[in-house]
Amino acid sequence: MEVRTSSLFFLLTFSAILFLTTSSCKKDAGIVETRLAVSKKDCSIPTNYDIVEFSVVNKNLCFAIGKSGNNMKIFKTADGGTSWLELPLPNGVVSQYEMDVQSIVFFDENNGAFTANNEAYRTYDGGQTWTTILTTDYTGNNPIYDFCFVGKNEAGEMILAESNENAWYDNHIVTSLPSSADYTIVHHFPHSGIHPDYCNYSNGRLHYLTRNFNFWDGEIQIYDFNTNDMETWDIIGNIPLDVHHAGGKTAIVTEYGKIYFHNWHSNDWNVSSYNFHDHDYTAIEYVNDFYIAVAQSSISTNYTGVWEEALDDSGNGHSEYFMQVQKIDDKSVYISGKQGLFIQATFK
């Protein structure tokens, strides 16, 4: 099935007021005051499914997961969002009770994987067929199948993160070559008492997050692929919803519109004043030398060197609901959202 559409977007740059170049848009998205030297391309998918996760292979090739209630769909574009194809799903995955879409990764047009409801599925033919990923732990006896994340590292390897709820077994971090059916355990570690349900890999570090914890008892676990060290940091306060490590700092975005920074190996989180709103942040990305933090109805960035809110939904006609952001290159990102929203933004 082929689908195509359009929508709108944002962002900001130097203090001079500049015009944006936009394509036609079917969604309600009034242009805010434009201090942005950003061109935007509307690549939205004509679906009522929310685009909750996606994977950028290059500017033209991208795979995305849409979710609606207990149902999910996988979409593919090979022309930068001008047109989209809906891909088949593994048997039994089309609809699952309390569907939890966790991650998707593609390495090229053929090889990719996704995780949903703690199961991992792999394709070698561009999503036409899928197989369940199942391997054994470091003892060679116990199965590993409770995955919460699949991603890729700088070497182009697949990274799989296990997060099982069985206190008798360790969690495992596993790698695999993109077109291989073999898996290598790079690290295993015991349970800490908290069950991670989300991961992020960035710049040599895999971050385990728990997005459902007691206010006084939160933590984040980080595995460093360069040193083979595992660290645990305490987080007291707002629940972290995404994390990114770059430039010697780890940035975490949380509920209630808060952004935190950690200078690695220090004991303290620097609580920023970058809370322009009370919308929950859902994702953060690092592009070249600046961050983009995506909230439900707002986007914040330090593109100009100072943190500012680039877009909000109060008094400017804007009504989009953003969900994910991912880097395309040193000047471009894709941003997804509710009801098929998918936007390409390029910084001048």
Image (cartoon, grey):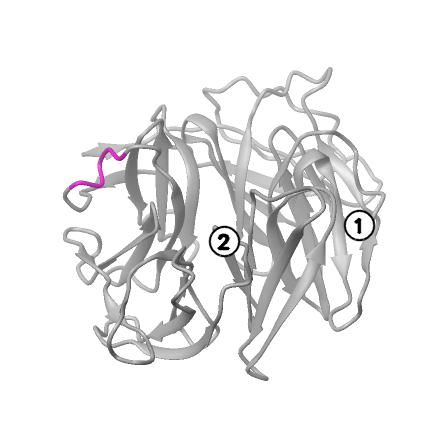
Of the two numbered discs 2 and 1 on the same chain, state the one appearing first in sequence.
2
Dot 1 amino acid type: Thr
* Magenta span: 92-96
- Report crowding for label 1: few under 14, some 14 to 19, many 20 or more residues within 10 A (C-alpha): few
Q: Quadrant of residue 14?
A: top right
Q: Quadrant of residue 109?
A: bottom left
- Say if residue 203 shows up in the picture: no
Q: Secondary structure at mark 1?
A: loop
List the single residue furthest toward the bottom.
227
- Identify the residue under disc 1: 304
| Residue at the image position 29 percent from the left and 32 percent from the top | 97
Residue 130 locus on image (x, y percent): 17, 54
Q: How would you classify the magenta stretch by its main secondary structure?
A: loop
Residue 296 highlighted magenta (yes or no): no
Residue 114 locus on image (x, y percent): 32, 53
Q: Nearer the viewer, residue 43 or 229?
A: 229
Q: Nearer the viewer, residue 72 or 190?
A: 190
| Residue at the image position 56 percent from the left and 25 percent from the top | 320
Residue 276 locus on image (x, y percent): 79, 33
**Residue 65 relative to residue 200: left or right:** left
109 up-or-down from 93: above or below: below
Dot 2 amino acid type: His
Residue 326 locus on image (x, y percent): 52, 51
34 up-or-down from 286: above or below: above
- Report crowding for label 2: few under 14, some 14 to 19, many 20 or more residues within 10 A (C-alpha): some
| Residue at the image position 66 percent from the left and 32 percent from the top | 298
Disc count in the image? 2
- Identify the residue under disc 2: 195
**Residue 156 relative to residue 123: left or right:** right
Q: CA distance from mark 2 to mark 1?
A: 38 Å
Q: Nearer the viewer, residue 195 or 175?
A: 195
Q: Secondary structure at mark 2?
A: loop
